[in-house]
Image (cartoon, rainbow, N blue to C red):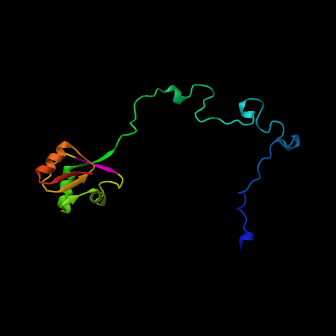
Amino acid sequence: MNLSNLKPAEGSVRTNKRLGRGEGSTRGGTSTRGHKGQKSRSGYSKKIGFEGGQMPLQRRVPKFGFKNINRVEYKGINLDVLQALNEKSATGTMDVAYFIQHGLVSKNAKIKVLGRGELTAAVEVHAHAFSQSAIEAIEKAGGKAVTL
């Protein structure tokens, strides 16, 4: 068997309807488009959301709210999570690479340390943002909060 012997599977290939080739073909005249109307004309294409001239849904429903295009999304990490991490693998510094390695954040995420829980270990924490209570708790434990 070689490329010259290949054939499509039986019944998988059909010939196209040949439209507009005279009355003898049974598909002449209107070429299966019916009589008159927008769909019978050449160049017709229905626009997305078109409802036959009725006011479309996306224009009937009121728009509201505001999306701030400059919003910065942070991934929050609480103090109790930092404490658990420190108990599991004691380290002096916790930076973005450390959080990524332990599966807390993805590589493009911005990190904000939040103040829930207690921190007893003196660690240096590197993050993009800190809550005020988190800074106080880290410094009270003898650590350091470094903003990136």
Asked whether the viewer can see residue 118, the reply is no
Asked which quadrant contains residue 27, the reply is top right
Magenta span: 109-113
Residue 37: % across, % down: 73, 29
Q: Quadrant of the N terminus?
A: bottom right
Of residues 60 and 131, the one drawn nearer to the viewer in this rendering? 131
Compared with 96, 63 (above or below) is above
Of residues 16 and 9, the one drawn nearer to the viewer in this rendering? 16
Residue visible at 51% across and 25% down?
Answer: 60
Compared with 124, 5 (above or below) is below
112 part of magenta stretch: yes
Residue visible at 53% across and 29% down?
Answer: 57
Residue visible at 78% across and 47% down?
Answer: 17
Residue 141: % across, % down: 11, 52
Asked which quadrant contains residue 13, the reply is bottom right
Residue 134: % across, % down: 18, 46
Q: Residue furthest right?
A: 24
101 part of magenta stretch: no
Side (left or right) of 91 relative to 61: left
Asked whether the viewer can see residue 35, the reply is yes
Residue 65: % across, % down: 40, 30
Secondary structure that dominates the magenta span: strand
Report the number of discs: 0
Side (left or right) of 39 relative to 63: right
Compared with 88, 2 (above or below) is below
Of residues 111 and 81, the one drawn nearer to the viewer in this rendering? 111
